[in-house]
Amino acid sequence: MSAHESMEHAEHAEHASGSNKKIALLIAVLALFLAISETLGKGAQTESISKNVEGANLWAFFQAKSIRRTVVVTAAEQGKLTLAGTTDDAMKAVVQKQIDDWTKTAQRYRSEPETGEGTEQLAEKAKHAEHERDEATAKYHHFELASAAFQIGIVLASATIITGMFALAYVAGILTLGGILMTALGLWWPHLLHLH
């Protein structure tokens, strides 16, 4: 091998070494973004599950309160029938008091702002939990797509080192930008794209 060929070979190796360092840096950046999107995705998934359970519990409580209210309203209606058929004034007073108590209880079961446990308040809380669940689910889908883009980018960047095909590194770079975009959408605009 001539001195000129040795020199060209050394320059090529140095150039490849510099390119490999850039590819390694790209892989490191992709791995960083992957870790971030995975962490955000897990947090969003946990939030979605938590809000789903919360909503289901609130709707179950709503249903129990509705059943209680129906029973009390039915008892008050039955009391009114009993009252209509009673001639004894003392008995009428007792039945009327019971009807009034049942009516107050039924009203309290419908709306209880001080405790937040009336059916109106429970329905509002359950709808709010469902909204938060949907928000977290939308975020989760974006973070999952971002993670997939980063993972594929890592594979393509790694393949660039092995094959020397720099087009793969450019595709990895594009996937990095796509992953960053999906992460940003998940963080700030999760309903801009409908992914489910």
Image (cartoon, rainbow, N blue to C red):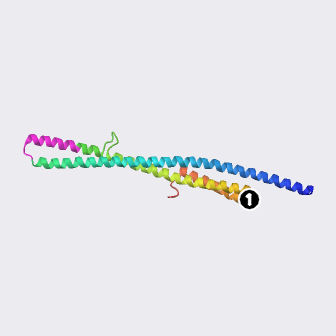
Quarter location, residue 158: bottom right
Report which residue position mark 1 lands on: 163
Q: Please state the horizontal and vertical placement of residue 188, each as a whole percent of the image.
A: 54, 50
Secondary structure beneath dot 1 equals: helix
The part of the chain drawn in magenta is 86-103
Q: Please state the horizontal and vertical placement of residue 152, each as a whole percent of the image.
A: 63, 56
Picture residue at 58% right of the left edge, 49% below the top: 37
Picture residue at 13% right of the left edge, 40% below the top: 94
Judged from this view, the residue extending furthest toward the right is 2
Q: Does 34 sit left or right of 123 as displayed? A: right
Q: Does 106 sit left or right of 92 as displayed? A: right
Q: Please state the horizontal and vertical placement of residue 15, each as a whole percent of the image.
A: 80, 53
Is residue 177 magenta-colored? no
Q: Work out which quarter of the rendered image holds the N terminus and state it.
A: bottom right
Q: Please state the horizontal and vertical placement of residue 112, each as a whole percent of the image.
A: 31, 42
Picture residue at 61% right of the left edge, 54% below the top: 179
Kind of residue at disc 1: Thr
